[in-house]
Image: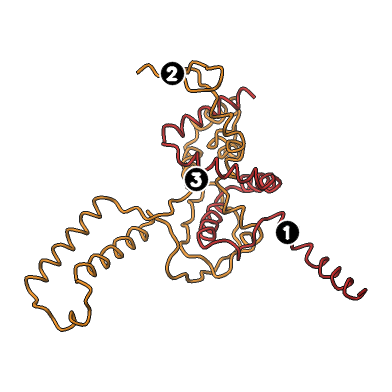
Chain colours: A orange, B red
Amino acid sequence: MRCQRARKWMTAAVDGELSPRRRRALDGHLAACAACRRELAVTERMLAALEGLPMEAAVSARLEQATLRRVRLAAADEAERAPASRWRLWLPLPAFALATAAVLVLAIGIVRRAGEVPGPPAVRPAPKVDAQAPPSPLSPPRRIVKALPAEPPAKLAEAPELFVDMPIIRNLDKMTHFEAIQTTTLDDEPATPDGQEPPSNG
Amino acid sequence: MRRGAAIAAVLLALAAPAVRAQERHGRPWQELTPEEQWRAWENYQRYQQLPEERQKMLERRYQQFRAMPPQERQRLRQNWDRYRDLPPRQRQEFIDKYHRWKGRK
């Protein structure tokens, strides 16, 4: 098999849509071709990213604890050093709450910037979006631009729902036959006539 | 009276392509929620990184998806939510079952 054909079959292989015969042929090629193995890894990562993105910011417990510790230390430090200053009379909100909010906002900002939590940015500058051809199979994946353009590119404007529903469209076969697939039994499962789960032994 | 009907006919004729486009491609960009616009934009960038063959395949499937009745599309979206909510082990099991199911077809 040539690399060109192997690359043509790769995304179907990642989706589990390649016939067993083609899959074996592809596996044989991959065993001997390091470039195609790298390409397969890139394709797998890219398609996995299409599976959907978390909509809420998830801050790790460690970061949360560290943030709260800093806030406590800052509050204690302030209580030790400063007697009630004049501005506090005008601003009844306790410094502790202010500091908590500021540090949490900063922490979430850092996490988002690190690319762990995608979400709409507060400010959306308009980057220049040029019509890009698909990259060559071995080029590294381009970075995802984290800012919404002022005007969507033509392709996106023409069929926006293609991109909104892309994970579903990618898995169209699986989602169309979801119930039938769920009631399918695997080899090591005893088949039940009505499609119910086999009784547990424990 | 006749003039009013003629104006209505012209307006309908002008609106028809837009209606057909909406049937074919769904809601226009401006009607998406900010979250949908954001999701679409990120997926669009990933789409651009896919090989051309794969892009064409997604477009073919999208036409199939658009041709489905709205209730069927809604059912697929609900199935997707169920699939996404599966824990990793059950998701892998679902994929294994899919291969088995596909093999039996």
Which residue shows up at 21% across the image and 76% down it? A92
Check the image and name the residue furthest to the front. B1
Q: Amino acid at mark 2?
A: Pro
Q: Which residue is mark 1?
A: B21
Which residue shows up at 71% across the image and 54% down it? B24
Q: Amino acid at mark 3?
A: Glu
- Same subunit, labels 3 and 1: the answer reads no
- Same subunit, labels 1 and 2: the answer reads no
Q: In which quadrant is the C terminus of chain A drawn?
A: top left
| Left or right of residue A19, residue A143 in this image | left
Q: Position of residue A180 (x, y in %)?
A: 59, 29
Q: Which residue is mark 2?
A: A199
Question: Which quadrant of the figure has residue A67?
Answer: bottom left
Q: Position of residue A83 (x, y in %)?
A: 8, 77
Q: Residues within 10 Å of mark 1 (few under 14, many from 20)?
A: some
Chain holding disc 2: A
Q: Earlier in the sequence, mark 2 or mark 3?
A: 3
| Left or right of residue B69, residue A14 in this image | left
Residues under numbered marks 2 and 3 in contact, where contact means CB atoms less than 8 Å apart? no
Q: Which residue is mark 3?
A: A51
